Image (spheres, helix red, strand yellow):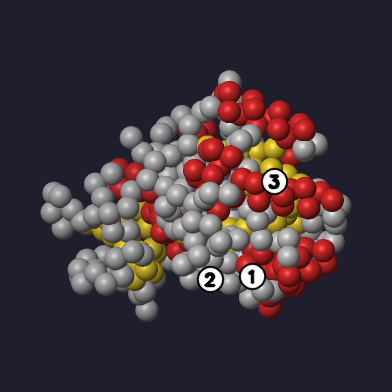
Amino acid sequence: MVELTGPDRASTSPNPLGDVDALVDGGDMDCGSGLLLLITRAMRRLEPGQRLGVRSAEASVDVDLPVWAELVGHDVVTRVAESEQGPWWFAVSKAGSTSGGGDKSGRTEQPGTVFSQGERTPVGRRLWIYTNFDCNLACGYCCAESSPKAAARRFPPALAAEVFDEFRAQGGREVFLTGGEPFMHPELGTLIEAADGLERTVLTNGMIFGKGTRRKTLESLDRDVVLQISLDSATPELHDRQRGAGSWARALDGIELARSLGFRVRVAATLYDEDPKGAEALHRRLDDARIAPPDRIIRPVAQEGFADTGVHVALENLEPEPTLTVDGAWWHPVAVTNPHLRIADAPLPLAEVFGVVRDTLAVQDAADRSGREVFRCA
């Protein structure tokens, strides 16, 4: 039975390809903006020799999809154009194993930038979990569109236990729990406990764990749990403008409380623009707070979620950091509101999530080695 998947599931266009084993409708996505993830996921569910039908209304796919097929060894056996302007239909016969990739070196350093740099983390070593999406703040650049009015979409502890069991079994090492504000999840302690044995980091604004049941949750945590607290500037002006009046002072209080209780604290700043003087002042403030240099991150705003400006992120320029929410899996934690960077419609099985990422990286790396620009936006 042919199943239509993709953003245009309601398409009524008749299938001119004949008998295919699965059918993907990419709508107007190009390969760089998400079609590559969609077809990679569909191909993983087919056996060698089975055929995937692909429909696309994006003209660039007529060039890019055959190149993708060549890179990974598949065969485009049929191509049909409804008109000169499309849409286009392809039947692609699956080859044998397309595994591999993921070995490309890390990002190129940007000399002089104030933003923290990093390298590609091997797929399967690190996992991000959105514990919830409600938050005590409504930051104007929030990539997850979290706020006091956001639906909580809490990650259930039982599901987390399944996830972490599979993650450990696959050799996973690091778990990052983010939100929303994780300390608004009433069962945060249980979630963190379920990840015992893994390197655990909780991302928080540091403002609400000082009293009541949240203070009890904080004090009950193992001291090998790392707390990453947001602090955007050395003085209140920028931080409060971006996050809300009074939030800077309360974040500092949260940092001091966490350190006094024996937690390792990392500090993360988010900036719209390069600001060497501001970054230098923040580093001096963190020196005074005895935050070690390796525990400082300065990151740019991503043009996702609430942010209407910032760094454009897409499949071709964003190193993967597989991320789970209660209702799906995503390429990266900054992209959980971007349907083009959704990997799966459910957080489990992890094997499929990691497999799609590895196969996608294999295609990108093969394109880099070939010297051709494939699946890149102009």
Nearest-to-viewer mark from 1 and 3: 3
Q: State the residue in front, 222 or 184.
A: 184
Q: CA–CA distance between discs 1 and 3? A: 22 Å
Whichever of labels 1 and 2 marks the residue nearer the N terminus, that label is 2
Cβ–Cβ under 8 Å for marks 2 and 3: no
Residue at 67%, 74% in the rendered image? 186
Name the amino acid, label 3: Leu
Whichever of labels 1 and 3 marks the residue nearer the N terminus, that label is 1
Q: Position of residue 282 (x, y in %)?
A: 65, 32
How many C-alpha atoms fall within 10 Å of the one at disc 1: few (<14), some, or many (≥20)? many
Label 2 sits on residue: 152
Whichever of labels 2 and 3 marks the residue nearer the N terminus, that label is 2
Is residue 228 visible from the viewing direction of this image?
A: no
Q: CA–CA distance between discs 2 and 3? A: 26 Å
Q: Position of residue 236 (x, y in %)?
A: 58, 40
Decide: is 258 above or below 14: above
Quarter of the view holding residue 378: top left
Q: State the residue in front, 163 or 135.
A: 135
Residue at 53%, 71% in the rendered image? 152
Callout 2: SS: loop
Task: Report whether 81 appears left or right of 239.
Answer: left
Name the amino acid, label 1: His
Label 3 sits on residue: 252
Residue at 36%, 39% in the rendered image? 377
Q: Position of residue 105 (x, y in %)?
A: 63, 34
Q: Which mark is residue 185?
A: 1
